[in-house]
Amino acid sequence: MKTIIAANWKMNKTRAQAEDMTREVVASLKEQPVTDRTVLIFPPATALDCVSKDAGNVLETGIQNIYPAENGAFTGEIAPCMVHDAGGSWVLVGHSERRHIFNEPDDLITQKVNFTLAHDLKMMLCVGETLEERDAGQLRQVLSRQITSGLSGQGNAAVPSIAVAYEPVWAIGTGRTAGPAEIVEAHGIIRDVLRILFNKDADEVPILYGGSVKPGNAHEILSLDNVNGLLIGGASLEAQSFLAIVRA
Ligand code: PGA
């Protein structure tokens, strides 16, 4: 499986800023190709079309959130057909900021997963425990619940369109990265749960780590067992920093 290096720009960048950075990243990837990795950007929805237009076959793009309906009276929401229209091929589902700031419950996340995959888009499901859950010894229970409920509607045919991102909530944007042993333990739990759902096909699902990834720690994290990629927030906002991670 190809390692996935994914940028989550969150609520950052105007269209002009997004275009500038995309051009710099694309120029670098054309000059010095990285063939064994998928490079993916989740820009804010307003910039998805311009990032997709400039992606030049070296980048994949996607949306940070979706609503599980074809269209209709859902003020502020975005439907799968609009993601296709803006050139995106991925959807990020269940990011901890969606779960915790916007109170998205597990059943809504499951609907989003199902709707995304039913509309020919690839889906990255984010999971991860809070510090309180970790301290209470609930790591396995929380990851198992989030994955089982998120992927409960999926059979093995969906496996090629699924990725999972492990993002411990306490490591996101805090500068505190999970240590190697913590990452290996969590990714191992996720692989176990995926095997319960998909048997041996589970080994084809990429598991990304996210949470304060930087150029200085990317290589070490990528070398860990069951780490098949990275999801990067803060350090993905600047071209040279993101490219350093892409090439780590
Ligand atoms: P961070 O964000 O790299 O800024 O910690 C990661 C994420 O939330 O995807």
Image (tube, helix red, strand yellow):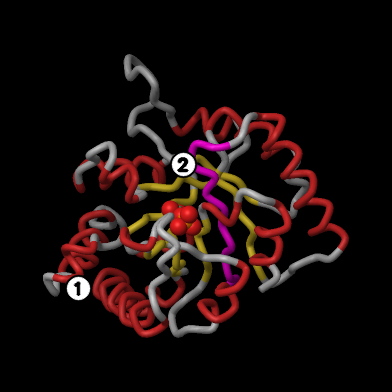
Q: CA distance from mark 1 to mark 2?
A: 26 Å
Q: Residue 182 has which mark?
A: none
Q: Secondary structure at mark 2?
A: loop
Work out which quarter of the rendered image holds the N terminus and state it.
Answer: bottom right
Q: Residue 16: x and y, percent?
A: 71, 30
Q: Which residue is mark 1?
A: 140
| Residue 5 forms part of the magenta stretch | yes
Instruction: Point out the tag, 1 or 2, that comes first from the N-terminus.
Output: 2
Q: Which residue is mark 2?
A: 64
- Please tell me in which quadrant of the rendered image residue 247 appears: bottom right
- Please name the residue shown 36% across and 49% down the image: 95
Q: Which residues are magenta?
A: 1-12
Q: Residue 96: x and y, percent?
A: 32, 50
In the image, 32: left or right of 132?
A: right
In the image, 171: left or right of 224?
A: left
Q: Residue furthest right?
A: 31
In the image, 247: left or right of 170?
A: right
